[in-house]
Structures are given as C-alpha cells and as structure tokens.
Amino acid sequence: MHAFKFNGRKDIGRRLVSLSKEKILSFADTFDCIVPVPVTEKRLKERGFNQSFIIAEEIAKIAGREIGHSVLLKKKDTKDQYSLTREERKKNVRGVFAIRDRARIKDKRILLVDDLFTTGYTAREAAVTLLRSHAGEVGFFALARTPS
C-alpha cells in the first residue's frame, strides 16, 4: 500500500483491486455510481494521481459501473490523517467535502471508495456530504484497513 500511495506504483493498486474481484462482484451491482474520495489540487500535484480514483476505475471496470469522479470535491487542504490522533483526525476532516454535481447523485446508490480505512472519519464525512445532497444511499469500499 505504501508503494502504491506514496511511490506512484499505480500497478500495485490495480493488482490489489483485481485480487478483490470476487468480493467486488458480490456487491457492486447494487450501486449506480462509484465515487472516489477526492484529494485537493495541491495533493494531486504533489502525488501525481489520486489513489482512490485508481481504485474506483478498477472497480468500475470489474462491475461495469459509472465513475462519478467529479461529483465530490475536497475543498481545503488537511493534514495527513496518519500523523494525527483519533480526535485530531475527526476534526481534520470536518466540513472538508462539497458536492460539485448534485444532479448526478440525486436518489442514486453511491459506492464511496478510498484506499485505507482507519477510524472511518473520512468515509463518514464524505458519506454525510453525499447524503445531505440527496444521494439515495451510500456504501463504502476501502482497499485496506489499518490496525486500530
């Protein structure tokens, strides 16, 4: 995961998703749209890619679903979650997401995708943002889970 996220090894991310193909096929058809957790423009320039988008692309290929890559927006920079305490993580992501295209999610079943799940604060904040903008339902998929 480290090489995928921090060393630009997109091939590793794609391979990890393909190893989850059976699991993905067991639930992906219940969703209308796949939405990756976004990064800020600054982070995108630093890293060169959004790892959640790579994962979402692979899931979309496996499941034959649409990617809503421009639906959710991260409107401000945050500190890296891995460097923070549990309570700091919660505050760090509060209010950072916005919806760019409400029409694309209205009454839709959304699969929110991220690379890592640790405390769930990022997923929760993004899901709440989607639901407040009238998404019908939000599920979540993370490629990996860190020990709590």
Image (cartoon, grey):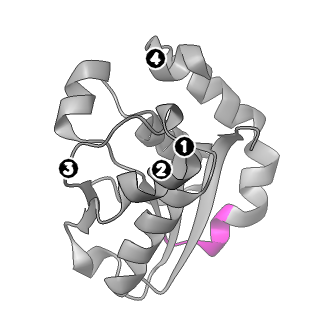
The residues colored magenta run 28-33
Disc 1 to disc 3, C-alpha distance: 20 Å
> Residue 20: horizontal and vertical position, in percent?
75, 41
Disc 2 to disc 1, C-alpha distance: 6 Å
> Residue 113: horizontal and vertical position, in percent?
52, 52
**Which circle's residue, 2 or 3, is located before the other in the chain?**
3
Provide the residue designation for mark 2.
89
Q: Residue at x 29, y 66 (%)?
A: 95
* Type of amino acid under label 1: Thr
User: Could you tell me which secondary element the residue under label 2 belongs to?
Assistant: helix
Query: Where on the picture, by quarter, is residue 143?
Result: top right
User: Could you tell me which secondary element the residue under label 4 belongs to?
Assistant: helix
Query: Where on the picture, by quarter, is residue 91?
Result: bottom left
From the viewer's perspective, is residue 98 above or below residue 17?
below
* Type of amino acid under label 3: Lys
Disc 2 to disc 3, C-alpha distance: 15 Å
**Dot 4: few (<14), some (14–19), or many (≥20) neighbours within 10 Å?**
few
From the viewer's perspective, is residue 120 above or below residue 85?
below
Residues at circles 2 and 1 in contact by the CB criterion of under 8 Å: yes
**Dot 1: few (<14), some (14–19), or many (≥20) neighbours within 10 Å?**
few
Provide the residue designation for mark 4.
6
Query: In which quadrant will I find the C terminus?
Result: top right
**Dot 2: few (<14), some (14–19), or many (≥20) neighbours within 10 Å?**
many
From the viewer's perspective, is residue 105 above or below residue 29?
below
> Residue 65: horizontal and vertical position, in percent?
51, 60
* Type of amino acid under label 2: Arg
Provide the residue designation for mark 3.
76
Quick check: can you spot residue 112?
no
